[in-house]
Image: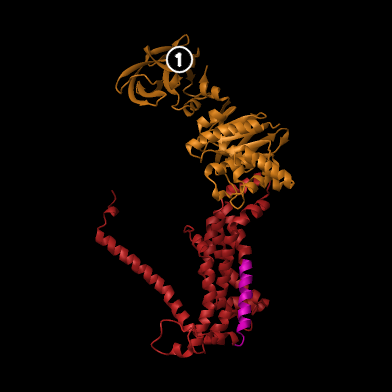
Amino acid sequence: MAEIQIKNVEKWFGSYQALKSIDLTISDQEFMVLLGASGCGKTTLLRIIAGLETASQGEVWINDRRIDHLAPKDRGIAMVFQNYAVFPHLTVFENIGFGLRMQRRPNHEVKARVERNAELMHIEQLLGRYSGELSGGQRQRVAVARALAMEPDVILMDEPLSNLDALLRLEMRAELKGVLAESKTTAIYVTHDQVEAMSLADRISVMHQGRIIQAADPLSVYRDPAERFVGSFIGNPPMNFLPATPEGGGKWRVAGQSYAGPKTDHTALDFAIRPEDLQPSAAGLAAVVKVVEPLGAHVLVTCAIDGQMFRAVLDSDTKLAAGETITLQPNADRIRWFDPQSQVLVR
Amino acid sequence: MSQTDQVSPNARKAGRYLYIATVVFLCAWVLVPLYLLFVNALSSAEAVNSFPKSALPEFDLGSLSFFAKFQGILDALKNSLIVATMTMVMSIAIGAPAGYALSRFEFRGKATFRLLILMTRAFPLPLLALPLAIMFIRTGLDDTALGLAFVHTTLAVPFAVLITFSLFSGIPLELEEAAWTLGCTRLTAFTKVVLPLILPGITASAIFAFVISWNEVFAAAVLTIENRTLTAFLLQNLDTTAIHLKFAGGFILVLPALIFIFAVRKYLFAMWGIANR
């Protein structure tokens, strides 16, 4: 059982505010991903939970214990670092057993737990090696096994896959998900990779400029971005935006077309649609095709509507050439509206 | 493209010759005196004083064995060892924590501090020798191994700080942080993770301090009378001895320093920011 509560945490580096009033609850056994571009504060938040950084203000609780004043070793956490941090002077066995030795566990228990976790990460044949004799992927496995061997309440991961090559990353991603679900450990995972976040998370916290903008399950984050930033940050290619003016009665004018939207008294809204929620059709938004990129499974079309860049992901059989004009009909259920001033979602 | 790409073949060739000539010259600068010292120390008195000289040593151990029996030389050797060992211990005890602090913590005046460390080498020892001698006489430190070791430590500490600073910086902070999350305190993380990784470098830094003390002659000559170190002892006595014995004395002085420095050369490169090879 490990529920984490972060209450009003702030962090200042001199006069720069890295974290602005963070409130977040992570439930037991949840896989929480902190997602954001570099410099958004996600790693700082993780390090505050780990105790490697002190918050300027606020509290961190694990279950019913306030931990923000404790040393890292007394918090019941284990961490996997971006550069693995496998101790080069120790064998894989001693690396995995390092934390258990520090706890002065009996030899037979250390041996059993090291072997169990090495097996889990498929590195049981490497136990006698040193980190210099391992590949990047193998080191990553050692780092994860070392964290799991501690049987922590919470496992913290700081971009653990970002130093692996693409193929290995896919493999490790699936494996991590399985292993962590099995271990029933609460996990907090920091990444800038939205695909990684979508595929691993039970819940994603999207961070931007020191704030958590949205904390929700992956599909909600994708379908109903709380702010315009989330829509443009998540999804590749990102969400399309077009300016809209009110026609009255919940109708909005977008690039010469009329669409049903929220019944509000805004003088302007931003119309938003995901590229895959567009269909070529007889009626719809008229777009001038600029670039056509066939990607096998589908074709990515970059075009211009009223001089604004607009992307559509269409069926790969669609025959198009640059310079043509097409009309794209958005899937009415998937249209979203944002306030151009506050940038937040308007329903 | 940039103009530097368009150097004519002749100019490039000339540049290459200049480069080779410089390398040869610098090597000769260091190696020729060493070679002459080596040849003459291992030759008999007659060979040293005769002309023309042979290019190869005779491997005559006469001069060297004379030295071994020389009155007071063993005491001087012992003093040298004592002072150098004390210097070694003190410079690491002071220098390594300073190097760790410089590499791991941000504090006000860090850049100035680093500069000041180097600045301590800017004062010529002869300038300090007289005030030091007076101070030592007042405190009773004159003519003692400890007093001399203090002076040598002052000379060796800047190097100890800079070498250990670069060594600690070479150990990723993440390793220490990982140790903290795995149940270590700052101290146990240091002893269980940092220390084993840094030990070879610390040894090298210690040896370097040892050599600095071993080679130092000025302070040793001024501050000791009875308890002379080997350098001061030889300086005092060789003035009046025959030339073949001077060579032998020089040889005895140079050899240990040479061996030590050769053994730790990799870490000295690290100190100046050249990549370890």
Secondary structure beneath disc 1?
loop
Question: Which residue is the extreme one toward the front?
Answer: A125
In the picture of the structure, the residue carrying the numbered disc 1 is A331
**Residue B98 magenta-highlighted:** no
Whether A50 is drawn above or below A337: the answer is below
A324 on left or right of B90: left
User: Residue A41: which quarter of the image?
Assistant: top right
Q: Assign the magenta stretch its main secondary structure.
A: helix
Subunit of mark 1? A
Whether A191 is drawn above or below B8: the answer is above
B268 on left or right of A93: left
The spot of residue A327 in percent (x, y) is 36, 15
State whether residue A308 appears in this view: no
User: Residue A5: which quarter of the image?
Assistant: top right
Q: Nearer the viewer, residue A161 or B137?
A: A161
Question: Which residue is the extreme one toward the right?
Answer: A106
B145 on left or right of A191: right
**Residue B82 magenta-highlighted:** yes
- Residue at (58% x, 32% y) in the render: A33
A248 on left or right of B107: left
Q: Which residues are magenta?
A: B70-90
- Residue at (56% x, 35% y) in the render: A190
Question: At label 1, which amino acid type do we have?
Answer: Asn
- The colour with which the image depicts chain A is orange
The spot of residue A238 in percent (x, y) is 45, 26
State whether residue A193 appears in this view: yes
Q: Which chain is red?
A: B
- Residue at (59% x, 66% y) in the render: B206
The spot of residue B40 in percent (x, y) is 46, 83
The spot of residue A299 in percent (x, y) is 39, 23
- Residue at (44% x, 89% y) in the render: B49
Whether B151 is drawn above or below A271: the answer is below
